Image (cartoon, helix red, strand yellow):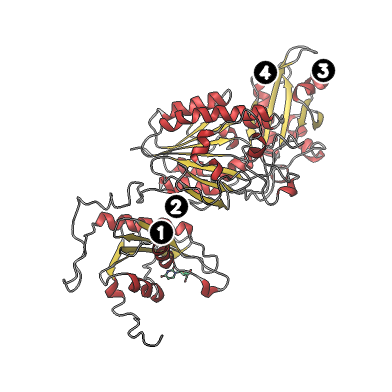
Amino acid sequence: MMKRVFLIVLDSFGIGEMPDAAVYGDQGSDTLGAVRKSPYFQMENMRRLGLFHIDGPNKEGGEQAQEPSFQGAVARMRERSKGKDTTIGHWEIAGVISEAPMPVFPQGFPKQLLNQLSEQTGRGILCNRPYSGTQVIQDYGREHMETGDLIVYTSADSVLQIAAHEDVVPVEELYRYCQMARAICRGPWGVGRVIARPFTGEWPAFTRTANRHDFSLQPPAPTMLDLLKGAGKSVISVGKIVDIFAERGITEYVRTENNADGIEKTLSFMKQDFEGLCFTNLVDFDMLYGHRNDRDGYAKALAYFDRKLPELTDAMGEEDLLIITADHGCDPDTPSTDHSREYVPMLMYGKPCKPGVNLGTRASFADIAATILAYFGVEKTCGGSSFLPLVMRNRNHSGTAGKWAYFGEKSREDAPESADGRTRMKKTITQEQLRSLACAAIDMRECSYAPYSGYHVGAALLTENGEIYRGCNIENASFSATNCAERTAFFKAVSEGERNFRAIAVAGAPKDSKKLDDCVPCGVCMQVMAEFCEPDFLVIMAKGEKDYTVKRLRELLPDSFRLQRTDCF
Ligand code: THU
């Protein structure tokens, strides 16, 4: 079985203002909220996946809704980067957080920048201000043809564009100039894109040619794409993903005409065999409707996507995940035609994924990258923290089952005999089962909240019925209020009505340590185990997926505190 993740970005599909929206002039923005008001709004399939269970102003049904009343795993995603453009949004989805927005030049580019460009190209510069691309060749085209000077202009976005007539500056030469500009535009001048804009014809009938070319800024750190490609996985770009990542970390790409074409091309990749990521951007929502404040157009485009969604989900295989998200907002109802600083949705769906999981609000888009990397078992060196353990239905580290079905009735190799041979366990446990539990504990370290000690612990507790309850350590500024991973797992289970347990796996080490410690549960946790478990309860101390020590509770805690008399009450 091939594992595949289909990650689809609905460009600009925000779901409500972020707390700092006012800093961006976007207070009250809510793209979904605006588009819902259109009579053309129709998203029944997305509703079934859980769109309206996501936290925020579009949430419906309140807490009393029956779970699981939706089919996906959903979250509201916060953008941690300082910015609201396409590039920064996509980079964060891929695990790279930007501390500063990309620079824009509403007054034109600084003299020093243009001087460098002039020197290197040996040509003068015309225009140097924000301009419409068709108007700029009308107004400066003739002068350009007479002098050979380059038409340099920008827009509201972080772009430097160079227009030149193909007879004056051959296309290849224009591309070289753009590469020079790309090398100059770094640091504070680090515009998102340098764009070559060749044109032909005679004034006043100049026309732009299809030889436009984008030279994107390289992501400043390794992205999920680089890491997946480095691990030998396919990384397929559908639409403008390839430009956003400056062609880095991509093994194959196709460009698209429009949303319909992007969906078709994604569907055609679903029919191919590969292991890895197919990353699709559907840009019409933003380019054609958000920026033009066309609420009905936006609603129709969403309705189209929604109608096609069953085709996508039907084409998914056993180990495929579909993740639908966005890169920023672009509320068509606000006077602004620019992007808006909003939360975005995350909807995950697939056979390996539990239905009806609401992950609340996640701290960063980068959690998507961390989750995808965890799914492929690729080491994460980019940002974000994985929510994979919280959404997987049945899981061991290689991505298959982890519940009772897997802890199979069929394979009954005996587990270690109890020391005195008297207490036989009701059910035996296999090495594979132990390993699966150890892997779940290792995974759970991702969820650890340990800003004080930096020591990340995960635990996975197996009940008699084959359920696995997972836990991580949760620290507190008041240190003693900290909860260990084992107790988190136990308390989750007990509060769900579980009382019978077979085994617990524990994995602990400092956050970025390459190796795990032989993490023996602390005395308090053992006391809790003693409360609920038989002496032959198994404790698995995981040092790796295949490297663990198994002990009985009685070996670790031969005796425990018990209330011997109750007449004190
Ligand atoms: N910790 C556990 O989660 N389990 C144990 O059995 C021992 C310690 C956590 C608590 C704290 O957050 C960190 O490890 C360092 O003590």
Looking at the rendered structure, the secondary structure element under dot 1 is strand
Instruction: Tell me if mark 1 has few (under 14), some (14-19) or many (20+) residues whose alpha carbon lies within 10 angstroms of its own.
Output: many
Taking the image as shown, residue 28 lies to the left or right of residue 217, namely right
Which comes before the other along the chain, label 3 or label 1? 3
Q: Report how far apart the C-alphas of labels 3 and 1 lie in the structure.
A: 69 Å
The disc placed on residue 390 is 2
Q: Nearer the viewer, mark 2 or mark 3?
A: 2
State yes or no: Cβ of the residue under disc 4 lies below 8 Å from any atom of ligand 1: no
Taking the image as shown, residue 525 lies to the left or right of residue 12, namely left
Looking at the rendered structure, the secondary structure element under dot 2 is helix
Which comes before the other along the chain, label 1 or label 2? 2
State the residue lying farthest toward the bottom: 568
The disc placed on residue 470 is 1
Q: Which amino acid type corresponds to the residue marked 3 in the rendered image?
A: Arg
Q: Which amino acid type corresponds to the residue marked 1 in the rendered image?
A: Arg
In contact (CB < 8 Å): disc 1 and disc 4: no
Q: Which residue is mark 4?
A: 209
